[in-house]
Structures are given as C-alpha cells and as structure tokens.
Amino acid sequence: MKRIVDNKHPLAIRWFHWINFPVLSLMIWSGLLIYWAYDPYKITVGGYTLLSFFPDGFYKALGVPFRLAQGMSWHFAFMWLFTLNGILYVAYTFISGEWRYLLPKRNSFREAWQVILHDLGIRKAPLPVEKYNAAQRIAYSSIIVMGLGSLLTGLAIYKPTQLWWLTTLLGGYEMARLIHFALTIGYVLFFIIHIAQVVKAGWNNFRSMVAGFDVVDEKA
C-alpha cells in the first residue's frame, strides 16, 4: 500500500531551489564569457601543460569569443538576484527551523563516507532514514558557504579599488580571482553529482522537489 507524505519539501525551499538553479547556471555561463578575455589557469608539471581551462576549441564550439561586454552585463545583473535569493533562503531556513535538517551533525563527516560507499554500491546495508543524509547535509551547507565566497570574491575583483580592504583581506586581486574561479568549478562539479544523484534516486525523489510530497510504500 502506498501513502502520501505531505510537505516533504516546503514551498519556500522548492521556490529557492528552482530559482537558484537557472540563475546560477546563467552566472556560470556569463562568467565563462568574461573568463575568455583572460584565461591564465592551467595545470602544469615541469613546464608541460596537463590541463588548460579552457582550450580555444572549447570557446569556439560554444560561441564564446568576443562576448566580454555581454558576459559582464549578464553576470552583474544576475548577481543581484543570486544574492537576494541566497539571503532569503538562509533567512527562511533559520526562521522556519529547516536549518536543523541541513547543518552537519557531529558525526556527519564520518557518516558521509558510508553514504558514498552506499551510492557506489560497495556498502549494501541500508542507510538511516532521515530527510537529508550526512553527505547531503555537508554538500548543502557547503553550497551556502560557497555562495558567500562567490559574492565576496566577485565584489573584490569587480571593485578592487573601492573595496580595497576586501580585496586585500582575500589575498589580493589575483588570489580573489583564483578563488572565484575555483568556486565556479566547484558549482559545476556539484551540479554533475547532484543531477546524477537525482537520476539514481528516481522519479519519486524528483517529484517531491517539484510538488512537495513523497509517496511511500508501506507493507501491509
């Protein structure tokens, strides 16, 4: 017998989630248009480049070159929506008490390894039944910290003269830009893992983030 569990994800959480996904995607895309104008980051060993972010063929395939002004306009416009959505999300989680489900617990880092092993099919024992497992708590809390980091480093490289104290606090313009870039790569990796987890979890889990309810199978 199946039973509907209402309000698995409150309406506000769903709204913040579905607003943030396209906004962050557009921020990453417009950031790529900006990064094209000066892309110094490479992984080199002994003078040999192992990985370049990103090769010219990548830019040309996506039609990125010569769109710097467009990228800056979109990036700064969506920055405000990204920031406002983040502030409202954090405020809501604290006011509603949702933060209790999101913040890592004392044993979360140790338990997260068990979640990873389970997802990889190595650990067969079922995981504890809870709204967010240990790995999710760490990941979702980290995204909030990353969002704050992106905002601060973005402001530091956007207004390095007016906000010189922030730029200096972050280690200077070059360091702030490197951190900003690293955080962006982190978002891309998070997207890939998150989408893979959603596909693995199945339709019921996806529906709960859209409609807010979950369908649970119960043994008679």
Image: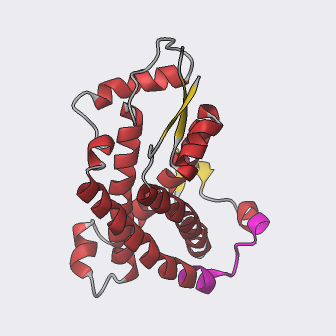
Residue 23 image point, x, y percent: 54, 68
Q: How is the image coloured?
A: secondary structure
Decide which of 43, 179 is in the foreground and name it: 179
Q: Is residue 98 one of those drawn in magenta?
A: no
Residue 211 image point, x, y percent: 56, 51
Taken as a whole, is the magenta stretch helix, strand or loop? helix
Answer above or below: position of 44 versus 73. Answer: above
Q: Please state, as top left, top right, bottom left or bottom right, where the C terminus lies in the image.
A: top right
Residue 198 image point, x, y percent: 59, 40
Decide which of 104, 166 is in the foreground and name it: 104
At a point 31% along the width and 25% down the height, the residue shown is 110
Q: Residue furthest right?
A: 61
**Residues in magenta?**
60-72
At a point 54% along the width and 60% down the height, the residue shown is 18
Q: Is residue 67 one of those drawn in magenta?
A: yes
At a point 42% along the width and 52% down the height, the residue shown is 10
Answer above or below: position of 135 versus 73. Answer: above
Res. 33 in view: yes
Residue 31 image point, x, y percent: 55, 70
Answer above or below: position of 45 versus 95. Answer: above
At a point 43% along the width and 20% down the height, the residue shown is 127
Could you tell whether 54 is left or right of 188 in the image?
right
